[in-house]
């Protein structure tokens, strides 16, 4: 059998599957590493593993009729290497076929290998927790940074909106002063004042522009202000 996952060892595939929540990462790791659509041999071996798992489940249910699904899966999880050994067979003084050091060795006729060689590699739970913690910390930092950027952009947008409002008030005050001067001039000349000019009505909602956090890396470039007369 030849694996088709590049240079990544099967134990890495098993660890990834376990992190993802796979209940049978060793058996599923074999499927992901060796089984291909055009390979009848490995496909049959994987199907035999699934059948063996189902047989062991049924046997456990017969012995423990009141057992819950979690208890059944815990029992099967502890027997994954045995399932591999049953299906793939073992050779004297050799590893399980196709598993390399991912399976148990038969050391009954070997005096040069230590006991640790017969034990399958164990996933370091503490290491997995540390990886998960680092990932959660990076995710939290990214969220905090995005929130800070959004808050800063909203503050700048509010400030710019207030400046536009203040300029509009100054223009309106200047326009009123000019109107008063024009009216006084016409009155001095004894002429009726001209009719006031007609301006379009202001928009119904004069609220600050909305800032959407679609792009947290460049939020400041997404601000659009209406600089027209309110």
Image (tube, helix red, strand yellow):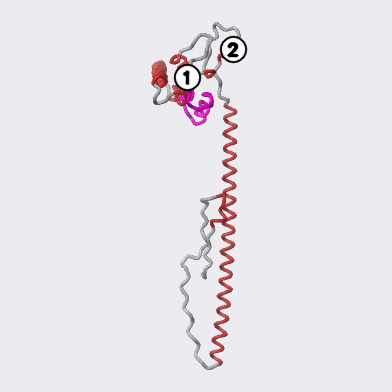
Choose the circle earlier in sequence order: 1 or 2. 1
Residue 136 among those drawn in magenta = no
Q: Which mark is residue 115?
A: 2
Residue drawn at 52 percent across, 65 percent down: 226
Residue drawn at 49 percent across, 28 percent down: 17
Q: Which mark is residue 150?
A: none
Q: Which residue is mark 1?
A: 80
Start and end of the magenta stretch? 1-29
Q: Which percent across, then down, holds residue 61?
A: 40, 19
Q: Which percent across, then down, holds residue 15?
A: 53, 27
Identify the image quadrant of residue 186: bottom right
**216, 141: nearer the viewer:** 216
**101, 206: nearer the viewer:** 101
Identify the image quadrant of residue 48: top left
Residue 65 in view of the camera: no
Residue drawn at 53 percent across, 63 percent down: 225
In this view, the residue farthest toward the bottom is 190
Q: Which percent across, then down, holds residue 113?
A: 59, 11
Count of labels shown? 2
Q: Indicate the secondary structure of the residue bearing disc 2.
A: helix
Identify the image quadrant of residue 116: top right
In this view, the residue farthest toward the top is 109
Q: Which percent across, then down, holds residue 30?
A: 47, 23
Q: CA distance from mark 1 to mark 2?
A: 20 Å
């Amino acid at each position: 059998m030849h694996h088709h996952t590049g240079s990544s060892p099967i134990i890495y595939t098993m660890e990834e599957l376990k992190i993802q929540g796979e209940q049978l990462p060793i058996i599923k790791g074999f499927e992901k590493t060796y089984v291909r659509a055009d390979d009848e041999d490995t496909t049959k071996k994987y199907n035999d593993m699934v059948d063996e798992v189902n047989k062991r489940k049924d046997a456990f249910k017969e012995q423990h009729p009141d057992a819950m699904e979690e208890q059944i899966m815990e029992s099967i999880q502890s027997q994954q290497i045995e399932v591999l050994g049953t299906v793939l067979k073992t050779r004297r003084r050799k590893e399980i076929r196709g598993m390399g050091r991912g399976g148990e060795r038969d050391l009954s006729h070997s005096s040069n290998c230590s006991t640790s060689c017969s034990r399958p590699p164990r996933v370091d739970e503490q290491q997995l927790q540390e990886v998960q913690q680092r990932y959660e910390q990076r995710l939290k930092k990214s969220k905090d940074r995005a929130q800070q950027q959004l808050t800063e952009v909203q503050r700048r947008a509010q400030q710019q909106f207030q400046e536009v409002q203040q300029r509009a008030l100054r223009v309106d005050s200047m326009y009123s002063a000019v109107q008063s001067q024009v009216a006084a001039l016409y009155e001095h000349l004894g002429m009726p004042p001209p009719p006031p000019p007609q301006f379009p009505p202001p928009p119904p909602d004069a609220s600050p522009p909305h800032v959407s956090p679609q792009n947290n890396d460049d939020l400041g470039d997404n601000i659009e202000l209406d600089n027209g007369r309110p």
